[in-house]
Amino acid sequence: MSPARPHDSSNARPRIAVLAGGIGAARFLRGLLAVPIESDEEPVVTVIGNTGDDITLFGLRVCPDLDTVMYTLGGGVEESQGWGRAEESFVVKEELAAYDASPQWFGLGDRDIATHLLRTEWLHDGVPLSEVTRRLCERWQPGVALLPMSDDRIETQVLVDDPSVGRRSLHFQEWWVRLQASVPALEIVAVGAAVATPAPGVLEAIRDADVVLLPPSNPVVSIGTILQVPGIREALTETNAPVVGVSPIIGGAPVRGMADACLAAIGVETSAAAVGNWYGPDLIDGWLVDESDADAVVKDVVVRARPLFMTDVDATAAIARDALALAHEIGRR
Ligand code: FO1
């Protein structure tokens, strides 16, 4: 990996801070950690994870984006989905259905439930989410420091017009999973974000970084939610580290997920250029787009085009390497 900056011998290991949502970010991180490097330049990667997708079901606290990063980098994710556990069974889910318990639209697997049981027990004992996440990562050894964006409770709600009851808000997961984002979101609100504080280590990771990366996560409900925690956006505009983003939109469509439905809710066109301009030059210095979007223009941001489909770990490592090369080219602010 090309070093993020010329090194003096005192700190050979580049520090990389990554704002992460779920599946796209987890896959990007797996590539980032696979970038071939000189031995003494193993990067120190701190991941700041979105917690706006979190939901409490049957009394259990579920943190989908944190778990997707933890399971993916720890080798336990169900690869075909990008979330949940591999070799999963759903006996508890079947039993709940036998009781006609709801909701049934969010599938909690038996192995996954063990994570939620421990998290819920520790949170109930007053352990902050950041410490809960650190403990869970002791098993999974993801190879990064995984921090929730905040230890305070934040939940994304989606405002919709329901023909039967009129305007109402839904938990993001109900809109995303049960409705498949098929009902237009009139507004997407990260409830609690405005009064939350960044989790311990979050602001320091951004300030002390040699490079900050925004992976191809959902710009609205993942990256956008993290940016709403007071202090985080400011830290990103103040850091001396170059900030490079990777477009989650290729050729006018999201690579996976339904970022287009989220972008429509905030009136942003579903294109690499529009997302880059929405992030803007105060936030990002560089923007990596797919070759099909090579004509993307982002005001006062350096745009580079390269193949962006994360088809396998090697392809993703090449994307991550190019993102780091762009950061190196931009240099410290
Ligand atoms: N996504 C689905 O589409 N269907 C599910 O039943 C589902 C269950 C689920 C359980 C645990 C978990 O951590 C994630 C789960 N997801 C499911 C994915 C989840 O909605 C997304 O990973 C994020 O919230 C969106 O980024």
Image: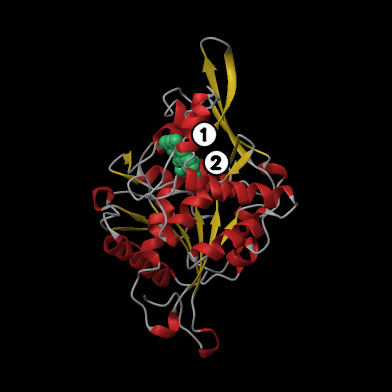
- Local SS, label 1: helix
Disc 2 under 8 Å from ligand 1? The reply is yes
Instruction: Residue 173: give its label.
Output: 1
What colouring does the structure picture have?
Answer: secondary structure
Q: Quadrant of residue 60?
A: top right
Residue name at image x 50 percent, y 31 percent: 95
Few, some or many residues within 10 Å of mark 2 (<14, 14–19, 20+) = many
Name the spot of residue 147 as percent of width and height, x first: 59, 59
Q: Residue furthest top?
A: 164
Q: Is residue 203 visible?
A: yes
Dividing the picture into quadrants, the one containing residue 203 is bottom right
> Earlier along the polypeptide chain: callout 2 or callout 1?
2
Give left or right: position of 92 versus 196.
left
- Identity of the residue furthest to the bottom in this view: 9
- Secondary element type, mark 2: loop
The image shows residue 181 at horizontal and vertical percentages of: 44, 28
Seen in the picture, residue 148 relative to 40 is either above or below; the reply is above
| Disc 1 CB within 8 Å of nearest ligand 1 atom | yes
Q: CA distance from mark 2 to mark 1?
A: 7 Å
User: Looking at the image, do the residues carrying marks 2 and 1 touch, with CB atoms under 8 Å apart?
Assistant: yes
Q: How many other residues sit within 10 Å of disc 1, few (<14), some (14-19) or many (≥20)?
A: many
Give the residue number, with chain letter if any, for mark 2: 53
| Residue 241 on image: x %, y % | 53, 68
Nearer to me, 98 or 325: 98
Name the amino acid type tagged 2: Asp
Could you say which is closer to the camera, residue 58 or residue 149? Answer: 58
| Percent position of residue 91, x then y | 46, 37
Which quarter shows the N terminus?
bottom left
Q: Is residue 2 left or right of residue 222?
A: left
Residue drawn at point x = 39 percent, y = 71 percent: 329
